[in-house]
Every structure is written in structure tokens, then in C-alpha cells.
Amino acid sequence: MNDPQSTLPTSTTPTRRSQGQIVVARALWHVKPGTAELRTERLVAPPPGYARIAAEYSAISRGTERLVALGQVPESERSRMRAPLQAGEFPFPVKYGYSVTGVVTAGSDTLVGKRVFVLHPHQDHFHAPDSMLAILPDVIPSRRAVLAANMETALNAHWDAGTTLGDRVLVIGAGIVGLLTAYLARAIAGTEVAIMDVNSGRASHAEALGIRFVTPSQAPDENRIAFHTSATNAGLQAAIDSCAFEGTVVEMSWYGSQPITVALGGAFHSRRLKIVSSQVGHVAPSHRSQLKHRDRLERAIALLDDARLDRLVADEVRFDDLPAQLPRIWSSSDLPPIIRY
């Protein structure tokens, strides 16, 4: 399918909507390791089956997106790691991202004026297929709805793990994905849930969601399931060490080209532990025969109907300032800000 967006030469001057059906939009492009810029794109009227969206907010992934920004996508994974509406090719230049909320401004009469979530890179105006638009319920504000992609990841991980009533669960890594994973576990009746992080400054986020926060020295053992989201050697090892007999480690981190070393000697085999990869590109096998990607996304959006989750999108950065702010965002220990258009 041809992309109904065409790229113009790079412009450093912010450009607003032009007259009529032609729009000059701006998108974030990663152009070399650690360097990004805003480029302009000329949008003609959207073709049949497409809508034009004016972005309100988008979310930044400090996991996958940071590796993309630093040029650390292995050559063997470049086709699999493409975002749905990505432009350019790995490593650079590439337009990447997958969590935007906005308002439909042109297209089908049934969609114009609707607030939607779209898997699209960071861009102020863009076109997307109607089939990729998830209409947001009135009860879920656009700002909070940018968590939909991360909530999908957390939901899929629980389907991969088979989390059930009464389980003892440890989540390692109190970033946004880890917090949402613990949040979902906490909602299952009878579960005993803790989230662990080396950064005690994240304890307030966990506590705001009703989740017990622990440091590495306080981490409970004998967990039936340990979800690992920290993308570190130490975190994965802690997940393995925290499991009960025949427990399961659900590995949610993606390391790009970074090698990881863990100790699988000692009691790993005698305890019959399992390490399961959970990745959001496919619906978990337990639900794949019944649900498609869109079904899972709609369920993830519905799970965002909780005002406590606004804690995870409290900080923001202006889209105009994003290229200059990204190095700080990648190196910060705080939760990443959302982008405001």
C-alpha cells in the first residue's frame, strides 16, 4: 500500500496548518545515534479509507524507542521491529513511535471529530488507515489514553504468564510497563503483588496505584511468577532467584544488541524454573484463536478507566522542544514525560 504522506526536505522552522486540503506537518526523525530533528511533510487530502489526525499527545518508550534512537536495533531484527506506520529504515534516518492520541480532522463523516488512539510515530498531523483507529471512550482522557500501547504490553504478558487467582507475583522494574503489569496483577482477586526497583524514588508511583514497593534487599521470594521489565542483567537474575519451585520468569525486556549474562547453574534446573519471552507483536497463544490485535487494543484501552493512572502521565514535554530534550529523557531515572502537541 502506498503511503499517502510524502516527505519534504528537512525544515527547522515550525510550520502550521496551511489553507485548504494541504497540510504541512512536522514529524520527529532520528537521524544519527542520540540525535533527532523535526522534519516537514506535505499531506494532501486523505484517500478513501484513510483519516487525517491532529495529534494531542504521544508517549515515549524508554525501552524499545531508546534503542532505536541510539541505533541499537540489530540487523537481524530490523524487519520484525518496524513500527506499524514507521517511515525510513533502521538504523537511520527513521521516523519511529507507536502511541499517539488525537482528533480526526478529515476523512469519513463517521470519524471526523472523534478522539482516537493510533500506533503512529511522533507527528503533529498525519494520515492513518481507518482500520487502525481506536475510538476513545468519553470517560478516558486523551492524555491518559497514550498509555494504551504499554497497557497492551502488560495485558499480553499476563496472558503469556497465565496469572490467576491467589498467585504470588513480583514485578522487577518500576517503569511504566512494570507499573501497569503490577497494577493488572493487583486487580486479580487474592494475588500477592510487589514491585521492585533499585530507584526508591519510584515508590510513590507504586503506592499511588495501591502496589507494594520493595528494594532489592526487600524482595519477596517464592513467587509463582516474576515479570522482568528492567532490561538489566541484575534484574533478570533477581527475577530468576525470586521464583518458587517450578515458577515462571516472564521476560518483557528487549535488549537490542546488548548481550545479557545470567547464572543458570546452581538450583535453576533442580527448581525446574521457566523463562518465557513475552512480546507484544503477537497476541499471546492463550488468546490468539479468539482475539485479534484490535480486540486486544480495545481491551487495553478499557482498562485505562482509572484516574489513578494519571500519575503515570503527569510530566510532559512540548513537541517543539522534543529533539533537544530527548538526550535528557533517555538518561533520566524518572518516568518519561508524554509529548504535548
Image: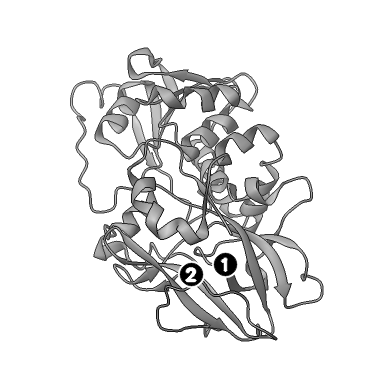
Q: Which residue is mark 1?
A: 124
Mark 2: few/some/many CA within 10 Å (<14, 14-19, 20+): many
Residue type at tag 1: Asp
Look at the numbered discs 1 and 2 and tell me whether their residues touch, using CB distance below 8 Å: yes
Residue 300 seen in the current view? no
- State the colouring used for the structure image: one colour
Residue type at tag 2: Ala
Q: Position of residue 147 (x, y in %)?
A: 58, 47
Residue at (28, 53) in percent of width and height: 256
Q: Which residue is mark 2?
A: 27
SS at mark 2 in the image: strand
Residue at (71, 40) in percent of width and height: 305
268 versus 50 height, above or below: above
Question: As rendered, which of 74 and 57 lies closer to the eye?
Answer: 57
Residue at (45, 64) in percent of width and height: 83
Q: Position of residue 35 (x, y in %)?
A: 31, 62
Say left or right for 61 vs 100.
left
